[in-house]
Amino acid sequence: MEDSLGSVEKRRGQSANKRHLELETSTSLMPSLELYGCWRSSASQRLQIGLRLKKLPFSYTPVCLDRGEQHSDWYLAINPRAELPTLMVDGEPWVQTLAILETLEETFPEQGHSLLPTTHRERRICRAIAEQINSSMQPLLLPARLRKPIIEAGCQTAATPLEPALQAGIRQHQLHALNDLNTWLASFSGPFCLDSSPTMADACVVPQLDAVMRLGLDLRPFERLVALHRHCQSLEAFAMAAPDQQPDAPNRSSG
């Protein structure tokens, strides 16, 4: 009996040592993460939220879109497509936010919050909501790199300036899209997009809401979206990723 008890204690000690070693190994293998983004880039904000939900430490390097720094030699060496954001992972550039968020979840499934729900059905819906923002709403805010060629081409034939009409069209499209999104999310229980835990869907929806508010749109008619935004902002991961909290935001300028 004494030998048997001794064997049990020995195995327990070996198991504890193994768990301790795994913890040390996982900590030592945590990658170096550097996010290149801009305070008013909703795609950059998505990644900030995802990294913070996953509790992955990262550094932040601003890239000024207003000065066109994304076209500078130093940034093109990082991302030749001149797009934001870029996440440098141990010196390797990762691009495209949805691909990055999914890869972070696959790489660190036990770290922080899961960015995907547990069931196959909810994962499908989560990805669909994120893709709705990524491909159907955010691009049609028409950043300057898309607006400029449209206006230049239109000015060759249009008798009146296109900029006001283009802005009106963007606002109208976003209002319709917000109404559809509000109706869609209202069919799911909250307070997040899907039930009681934040996911990749919330990391995409909240930055889009911030972006349309910067456009001057009133969200009050969209009760589900307003409640979602308010609840998410009560979490540190979302609050710290907000545009006005970034070091390169206009209201955070040193002086």
Image: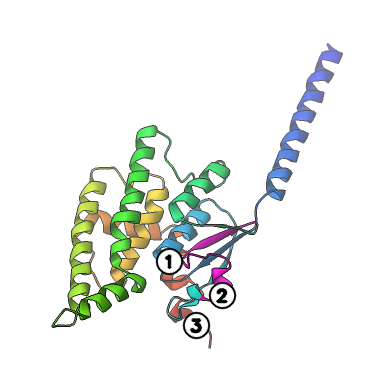
Q: Residue furthest top?
A: 1
> In the image shown, does 126 or 222 lie closer to the viewer?
126
Inspect the image, locate mark 1, and give the three-letter code of the amino acid beneath it: Ala
Residue 107 place in picture, x, y as percent: 57, 44
CA–CA distance in space, label 2 to label 3: 25 Å
**Which numbered mark, 2 or 1, is in the foreground of this view?**
2
Q: Quadrant of residue 3?
A: top right
Q: Which residue is mark 3?
A: 253
| Disc 1, SS | loop
Which numbered disc, 2 or 3, marks the residue that appears first in the sequence?
2
Q: Is residue 180 above or below residue 166?
A: above
Inspect the image, locate mark 3, and give the three-letter code of the amino acid beneath it: Ser
Residue 250 place in picture, x, y as percent: 44, 80
Q: Which residue is mark 2?
A: 73
Residue 209 place in picture, x, y as percent: 31, 62
Residue 106 located left or right of residue 198: right
Residue 37 place in picture, x, y as percent: 49, 68
- Checking the image for residue 17, the label placed there is none
Q: Which residue is mark 1?
A: 242
| Disc 3, SS | loop
Which numbered disc, 2 or 1, marks the residue that appears first in the sequence?
2
* Residue 192 visible in this rendered orientation of the protein: no
Q: Is residue 218 magenta?
A: no
Q: Residue furthest left?
A: 159
Magenta region, residue range: 72-90
**Which numbered mark, 2 or 3, is in the foreground of this view?**
2
Residue 64 located left or right of residue 27: left
| Disc 2, SS | helix
Q: Which residue is rendered at x = 22% and y = 68% of the image? A: 170
